[in-house]
Amino acid sequence: MANPPLLTPEQRQQALEKAAAARRQRAEVKDKLKIGSLSLAELFDQADRRDEAAAMLAKLKVVSVLESLPGIGKVNAVRLMRALGISDSRRLGGVGQNQRERLLRAAEDAEYRRELLNEQRRRDEEARDR
């Protein structure tokens, strides 16, 4: 395994501050999603911009974004990702247009989301029974 680059104490401090700022920004976005002051569509729009803040948002894992949405939670976020055929490791910046459309529909349309979750639950049970 390669060693990390040698940094001066000032460079190290700057890197630590930048990382802490990114964590704070991502936590703030998740909080806004939880309380409903930010929608998934708005988050995608923000992540599409070409600035440093957008680059930080693009690194959010999709599953953690879904967990932050009201009414979804951890178990349903993972189940929804499987139902939509999206990898658990997918980050916001790596979501394609088709995946984005399906995620937005699942986030906005409770009936569609319920159908997806029920179908995935059924598939999970069938796979367990084999």
Image: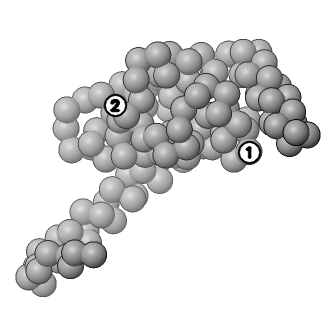
Q: In which quarter of the image is the C terminus?
A: top right
Residue 72: percent from left, percent from top: 71, 37
Q: Closer to us: mark 2 or mark 1?
A: 1
How far is disc 2 from disc 1 in space, using C-alphas?
Answer: 26 Å
Q: Can residue 65 be seen in this view?
A: no
Amino acid carrying label 2: it is Gln
State the SS at label 1. Answer: helix
Residue at 42 percent across and 50 percent down: it is 26
Please name the residue that numbered disc 2 is placed on: 46
Q: Within the image, what quadrant is residue 84 found in?
A: top right
Residue 56: percent from left, percent from top: 31, 47
Nearer to the camera, 64 or 6: 6
Residue 68: percent from left, percent from top: 60, 43
Whether residue 29 sits left or right of residue 36 in the image: it is left
Q: Can residue 84 be seen in this view?
A: yes
Q: Earlier in the sequence, mark 2 or mark 1?
A: 2
Q: How many marks?
A: 2
Give above or below for 127 relative to 30: above
Please name the residue that numbered disc 1 is placed on: 75
